[in-house]
Amino acid sequence: MAEIKKVVVKMVEGLQMVGRSGSGHAIVVDQMPDVAGLNQGPQPMELLLISLASCTGMDVISIMKKKRQDLRGFWVEAEGERAEEHPKVYTKIKLKFVFEGKNISKEAVERSIYLSQNKYCPVTAMLRDSVPIETEYEIIEIP
């Protein structure tokens, strides 16, 4: 049987809402004051980038650990370019993976990113037919 995920999002004030996940975690979602928001939480389109970056990032960390890479620090920077007209969808997304560690293999990095983008990350799979997703990486050698 297919796994079913459920969330509930409730109005708080203005456009501010609190979303609660099926696992019991909450997040405030809001908009900027110029569109009746209170600016007290990430905007929905920002959350989409956070979902993408964290999904692929978790994959990459897991794969790098399996490849026994000495990863000391890691982050993903996501940048989305939006259309000027409504519904102002993302027209291009760039992901930059930054690795910090000792003797990190370029091949391991490239393979980890490839596997996440093409096999494991369901958020990427949901988005890739709608918007081009570019990737790049940087390796920072720690002495």
Image: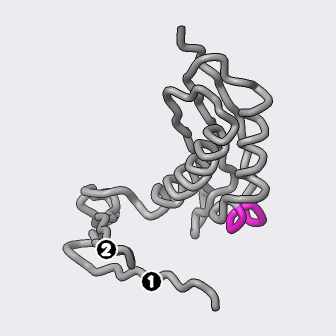
Query: Can residue 139 be spotted in the picture?
Result: yes
Residue that label 1 marks: 6
Residue 131's disc is: none
First in sequence, mark 2 or 1: give its number.
1
Residue 34: percent from the left, percent from the top? 31, 58
Amino acid on which disc 1 is placed: Lys
Query: In the image, which residues are magenta?
Result: 125-130
Residue that label 2 marks: 24
Query: Can residue 79 be spotted in the picture?
Result: no
Name the image quarter holding residue 4. Answer: bottom right
Q: Nearer the viewer, residue 117 or 13?
A: 117
- Which secondary structure lies at badge 1? loop
Q: CA distance from mark 2 to mark 1?
A: 10 Å
Residue 125 in the figure: left or right of residue 14: right
> Is the residue 72 above or below the residue 118 in the image?
above
Which quadrant does the N terminus fall into?
Answer: bottom right
Amino acid on which disc 2 is placed: Gly
Name the image quarter holding residue 66. Answer: top right
Q: Nearer the viewer, residue 90 or 110?
A: 110
Name the image quarter holding residue 23. Answer: bottom left
Q: Is residue 121 a member of the stretch shown in magenta?
A: no
Q: Residue at x 52, y 36 (%)?
A: 75
Which residue is the extreme one toward the bottom? 1
Q: Residue at x 61, y 39 (%)?
A: 65
Residue 2 in the figure: left or right of residue 48: right
Label 2 crowd (10 A; few <14 / some 14-19 / many >=20):
few
Q: Residue at x 59, y 28 (%)?
A: 99
> Is the residue 32 above or below the residue 7 in the image?
above
- Which secondary structure lies at badge 2? loop
Which residue is the extreme one toward the left? 13
